Amino acid sequence: MNNIPKHIAIIMDGNRRWAKQHNLPIKLGHKEGAETLKKITRYANQIGVKYLTVYAFSTENWKRSEEEVRLTYVIT
């Protein structure tokens, strides 16, 4: 436990790809990503990580359909 970093950064990527690989709607990939992030944040807090930076929405994401962009905000 002495080697716990004070700051961890996460780049969320692959939610759409995960959904497609599992033959699921893209929105379920985003939902699964959000649930995974919740687990990570809770565990990071438990072990004493002070700062968690999450890059979850890139400028490229704005090129997706309006429905998917809106959905991403609702889930997170």
Image (cartoon, rainbow, N blue to C red):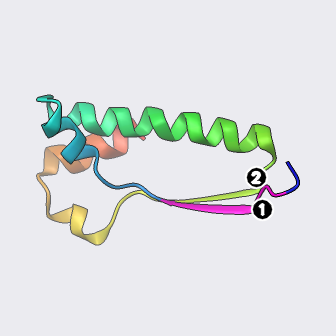
Q: Residue at 50% x, 41% y: name it.
A: 37
Residue 34 percent location from the top left of the image: 42, 38
Q: Residue at 74% x, 42% y: name it.
A: 45
In the displayed structure, does residue 34 sit left or right of residue 50? left
On the image, numbered disc 1 is attached to which residue?
Answer: 6
Q: Residues within 10 Å of mark 1 (few under 14, many from 20)?
A: few
Residue 71 percent location from the top left of the image: 26, 40
On the image, numbered disc 2 is attached to which residue?
Answer: 49
Kindly check if marks 1 and 2 are in contact, taking CB atoms under 8 A apart as contact. Answer: yes
Image quadrant where residue 13 sits: bottom left
Residue 59 percent location from the top left of the image: 28, 71
Magenta stretch holds residue 59: no
Q: Amino acid at mark 1?
A: Lys
Image quadrant where residue 53 sits: bottom right
In the displayed structure, does residue 74 sit left or right of residue 60? right
Magenta stretch holds residue 7: yes
Q: Residue at 43% x, 41% y: name it.
A: 76
- Residue 55 vertical position relative to residue 73 in the rendered view, above or below: below
Nearest the viewer among 64 and 23 is 23
Residue 67 percent location from the top left of the image: 15, 43
Q: Residue at 64% x, 61% y: name it.
A: 8
| Magenta residues, start to end | 3-10
In the displayed structure, does residue 18 sit left or right of residue 9? left
Q: Amino acid at mark 2?
A: Val
